[in-house]
Amino acid sequence: MTEFRADVLVVGGGLGGVAAALAAATNGARVVLTEETDWLGGQLTTQLVPPDEHPWIESFGATASYRRLRDAIRGYYRRWYPLRSASRELAHLNPGAGRVGPLCHEPRVALAVIDAMLAPWEAAERITVLRRHLPLAADVDGDHVTAVGFRALESGREITVAARFVLDATETGDLLPITRTEFVTGTESRDDTGEPHAAAVAQPMNMQAMSVCFALSHHAGENHTIDKPDDYAAWRAVAPEWWHGPQFGWVAPHPHTLQPRHYQFRPNPNDEPASIIADQSKDPGSDELWGFRRILARNHFRPGTFTSDITVVNWPMIDYLGGSVIGGTADEIAAHVAAARAQSLSFLYWLQTEAPRPDGGHGWPGLRLRPDITGTTDGLARRPYIREARRIRGQYRIVEQDLSAAVRSQGAKDYDDSVGIGAYRIDLHPTTGGDNYVDIPSWPFQIPLRALVPQRTRNLLAAGKSIGTTHITNGCYRLHPVEWTVGEAAGTVASFCVERRVEPQQITSTPALLQEAQDLMVRNGMELTWPKLTYY
């Protein structure tokens, strides 16, 4: 048994975990950061999801450290890629010219930047990163977590990390059950939350679909058709009654109206990347699928460098409705992940062989999986894109009434204990329990510290999707910049607690301590309030 000791243990190396570790180390704490995979970055890297960001991201509405991440990604392309001179000079370079957001890029670039951001702190022995380590158990003394046990997935050895503060930045809230921290899963009832869009009856296993994304390029005249999956016919026949036809098709429910939405697919348009509007408040842009999550636009680069764009398939057709990776046995979880991967491969086969083309033909055999982009042998993302985690029973629960534009006429609720800000629509994908989309406007919002602090456990903080939202409000608190801000806030609070020898509950209950912690955040470049804005 190997034992590590730290001021702050951050479990989960996604965006929240990375931000938490950086914040805690910057403020003087010694940190151990663990990650189950060999890539840090979570939804930005292992899950293959380019950033979903709000319309003001280039000017305000993000922390200084998140801006450093974004600037360094753009700088990586400017330094190492053969950009056209006009593209190189773009202040807001969008390498993929994707419409989902103004910084669509390859996961390996984000990975390289994240590793570089951590490197000086690792060299200074302020951050120790343990990749490929799975949390198994925790030592708990009353209301305090004293240590967490891990298995090293490559060697099989077991290690223990003892820490004064423990942060859950895992993708599914994995620390909560093993530390006996109270949590909620699935949909709450309307009687419980009072939310207009809450379910009539609570359903703990009814959660948003996960998706196994993949990257594609297209090479006309070539045949890259994969072998027909054995279960292709079964996936081809899936047709939820509210879907307007088979799930494998160009028609699906429109998230805003639930009416039929007709998607388009045209690989490798000869477009001008600089002309793309990557602002979902002005041009949602998602009817045309190739360009929506494109992560490399060949026309940004010198002629002949790339023979194709590269795009990410994260579309309604691969939303896995068969079950969740939360709450089951290890075998059940593995079966759901395998099924979601099988669904994605079957959808690729449909794209290559059966998908209706604008010219009246069927299929694009020139579509090629890009395992070089995903870092996997099968070309699918390393991990499923997880939209919903276990959520702590926090000191405060963020509800729809706090920020819904349909409920509130003058902006989101102001929180005295704000530790950051974010903005996104309440965006819920179809669920494992058969619910359709919920996609409604919300006001730009704040992140209350009390939503990161459990009701009982004294030295654990939520540092990612496990904060105290509901099933409904998780829909706008789960995106990239918000997850980063939540993690940075948690790391800052934990390091503040180490220095001041206090616990998070003392900060939320003591105005002077809260103000001191907030002042530290502002000095470090965290924005805690919004200017007057509208919703989208």
Image (cartoon, helix red, strand yellow):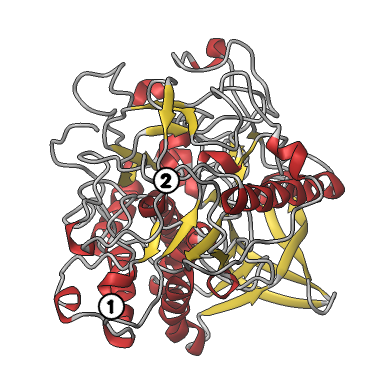
The amino acid marked with disc number 1 is Phe
Relative image position of residue 367 (x, y in whole percent): 53, 61
Q: Nearer the viewer, residue 238 or 451?
A: 238
Figure check: 276 above or below 22: above
The residue sitting at 52% across, 17% down in the picture is 198
The residue sitting at 27% across, 29% down in the picture is 412
Q: CA distance from mark 2 to mark 1?
A: 29 Å
Relative image position of residue 19 (x, y in whole percent): 43, 63
Q: SS at mark 1? A: loop
Q: Nearer the viewer, residue 273 or 178?
A: 273
Q: Furthest residue to the front?
A: 360
Relative image position of residue 69 (x, y in whole percent): 34, 69
**Residue annotated with mark 2:** 359
The residue sitting at 55% across, 44% down in the picture is 355
Look at the image and tell me whether residue 28 can be seen.
no
Dot 2 crowding, Cα within 10 Å, few <14, some 14–19, many 20+? few
Figure check: 261 above or below 68: above
Relative image position of residue 29 (x, y in whole percent): 48, 72
Figure check: 251 above or below 44: above
Quarter-of-image position of residue 418: top left
**Residue annotated with mark 1:** 301
Asked whether disc 2 touches disc 1, contact meaning CB atoms under 8 Å apart, the reply is no
Side of 297 where 141 appears, left or right: right
The residue sitting at 43% across, 33% down in the picture is 427
Q: Which mark is residue 107?
A: none
The answer to which of marks 2 and 1 sits earlier in the sequence is 1
Side of 287 where 236 appears, left or right: right
Quarter-of-image position of residue 319: top right
The amino acid marked with disc number 2 is Asp
